[in-house]
Image: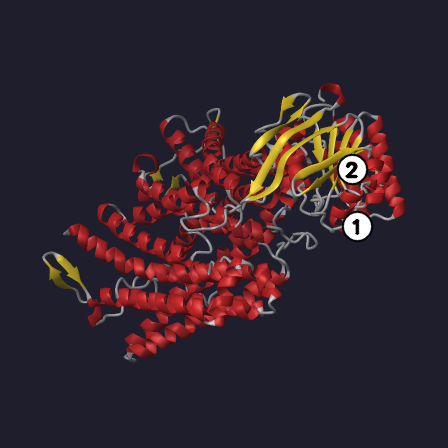
Amino acid sequence: MSGAAHPLVCRDLSISFGGVKAVQGVSLALPAGKVLALVGPNGAGKTTLFNLVTGNLRADAGEATLDGESLLGLKPWQVARRGVARSFQDLRLFTHMTVRENAMSATERGSWFWQAGDAKARAARVEEALAATGLSDLAESRAVDLAYAERKFLSMARILAAEARIWLLDEPASGLDLSSRQRFAGLLRAANARGITICLIEHNLDVVAELADEIAFLDRGVVLAVGEPQAILRDKALAAIYFGERAA
Amino acid sequence: MLFLQLLLGGLQTGALYALTACGFALIFGATKVFHFAHGASFTLAGYLFLLLWNNGHPAWLGVLAAIAVATGFGVAMERFVYRPIQRHEGGFFTVFVAAFGVSLVVQNLVGMWAGRGFVVADSSLSRATEVLPEVFLAPVFWVSLAVAAVLFLALGIFLTRHPAGVALRALSQNSDLIRAYGLSSHRLSLLAFALGSALAAPAAVLTAITTGMNEAVGHHVMLISMAATIVGGVGSLKGAALAGLSLGVAESVVLNFADPQWAEAASFVVLFGFILFRPSGLFGHAVAR
Amino acid sequence: MTAYLANLATLAAIFGILAATLNVAVGYAGIFSVAHAVFFGLGAYAGAQLALLVVPDALLAMVVAALVAGGLSLCLALPALRVRGEYFVAASLGLQMMATTLFTEAKGLTGGMGGLVGIPRPMILGVEVPTLALALTALVLILLATWLMARGSFGRTLRAIRDAESAAEALGKNINAAKALAVAFACAGAGVAGALFALHMSFVNVESFTLDQSVLIMAMVIVGGTGTLWGPLLGAVLLLSLPAGLSFLPFIPPTEIGAVQQILYGAAMTLLMIFRPAGLLGDMRTGRKA
């Protein structure tokens, strides 16, 4: 399970915080051009897993590889430059910048006074991202002035503009109403069609059922099951864990 | 013997630094306010004592007045400067600038009113006698150590026994916890400012009768308190006190071999080193970033 | 009178450069340095020594000053990358105090308290030029550079880092490099101001590069408004004309002007922070984050 079929692979990733094993021995492979949903109760280690892949946390053991190359020891910005984009549960928008600047900033990776590459192409990508997320009309509003759903879409616009091959999305659809959710689903489908591989943390099982091609079920830092959505969602034992009735 | 003399002199200075630093650390720990005007409490207390003393008032009155003015200043700062800024969700830099502004005002007002340069309260306490061959000590040495010891002991008892003291300690660990228990964090932060500022007063009085005050002394005291708090580890009063004591000793030793300039610089080399290599300080439990 | 005004204008331009460059660190990069006078001093000593020992060429002096100050900005960048908030302010205070001592004691390089005297008049290609023209040109160029930077991708990167550092990093931005570059730019600018100052005064000593001076520059930025283009310049002009204005008031004895000035700008800093933390020209909606 590597190579073209699975661009991003985790092997035996483990980390503990002060004796608590947040993630232990997690092995997962993201299927290329598909959506893998991470599902599990709070504290299952889903966001921690993202942080391990993106270099925000250093694993005690195991490694993550991108196209066969280890991401071990890379800084978050280096991981990002290899084509992995992520969103945050609390969004972390650039609040005092406009919507357009937020997206624009996602295309600017150079830390020098100017950017290498084609400025026009970058500007076009920004407008595309804003159009795709329905934010074109709000391009000059500041992020801090946006409504809840618009902020969520701005977070997606940054990822679209960043031109990554792998998206790690932390609860991107939580709190969205039905029509926004459908718009969001459209974004992911379009991304898949362009060959983008997506890993999604999501609590709403309806959203998961609608979007995921594959589900990984985590609990207490361990992957309990990986498989087809229907199989996982119908599993009674997993449902019991998910809804808080611990099967001993 | 020279070394012993320097060590003892350093202990005396250090004990006073420890008191002021501990006050600063108490305020910073409990309220997360970087009380940069802490030195102004010190200046005001010292000069008020000098004024009363030189006009022939009894020492106890001067000491009480010094404590009152330091405490009052700290409380006023909390109430009229820091709290309004925090209401607007001002960041630490806003707080820092405001406090710096106040300390400039105090320093220059004092300079205009009391004159610039050193003033010392002449007292029999500061007359040194030879206690060992070539080692001179003034009674104020013992007074300084005793005052510091008694105050630290009292503070320790208050923070561990009295409910308000326990709440203050809890506040420095976790401010959400306090809110959850329904304690008023406003009143606690006033208490922290009152206590922390009061600790600067005895140190100021003792400084006034030994080395003397000048209008810029608050600046120096403030920088030392800040350095001691960070080197000692934010959140640790013990650390701040110990670091203050060591900075005093180090200063006294360096002073004998080099210009006074170097003594202060030495403290800042230590501070700079700690910030670069061990930002959590000696006893800190949390890393700075 | 003309000479008096020209002197004031030159100083305003020099302090305008200082405030504008400090603003890059404070207002855009969120690096709250209280050690700007250190780099002002480094530039001044470098420019003065060059003029004294090699050649009094103004352009060369400014370039050398910028290189020295920009290079040594690493002393400020290092703590800026390691710690933030109060810790960084403490670190920059520490740097300022150490530098003051070094400036006083390294007599071979700085002349100590006596300073460096008799710095020759500035020349460009062998022709003597007035310092006012030099300072104004430098100010315009630096303001232009700041403006371009703030509008361009680098300014956006800095603001992104200030708003949400982890998100900026997750988008592939090398945060350490961007911060170090912002600090280097700010410090190099202070160095240029220092060289101009040395050439203008033809005398420099440590008293111009102390903590008080750093605080004055910081006050200029804050009074004018951090993160704005014109704010720091306005602040510089206001705070510099303060002592001049005060000297016209008959009821203040001349010996107390320094103190009254400090009281006024201390009070201004405090009141502004309480009532208008974004400064005179600042955007109230933004406020200031730290």
Residue at 48% from the left image edge and 43% from the top image edge: C36
Give above or below for B125 relative to C210. below
Residue most extreme to the front: A248
Image coords of residue C4 (percent x, y): 48, 48
Q: How many marks?
A: 2
Q: For mark 2, name the chain.
A: A
Q: For mark 1, name the chain.
A: A
Q: Amino acid at mark 2?
A: Ala
Residue density around tag 2, few if under 14, some if 14–19, many if 20 or more, within 10 Å: many
- Relative placement, left or right, of B126 versus A92 is left
The image quadrant of residue B208 is bottom left
Q: Nearer the viewer, residue B269 or C244?
A: B269
The disc at residue A148 is 1
Which sits earlier in the primary sequence, circle 2 or circle 1? 1
Mark 2 element type: helix
Mark 1 element type: helix
Image coords of residue A68 (percent x, y): 66, 21
The disc at residue A157 is 2
Give above or below for C10 relative to B34. above
Q: Nearer the viewer, residue B64 or B175?
A: B175
Image coords of residue B200 (percent x, y): 38, 65
- Relative placement, left or right, of B142 versus B281 is left
Is residue A133 visible from the viewing direction of this image?
A: yes
The disc at residue B64 is none
Q: Nearer the viewer, residue B144 or A234?
A: A234
Is residue C149 visible from the viewing direction of this image?
A: no
Image coords of residue A100 (percent x, y): 77, 39
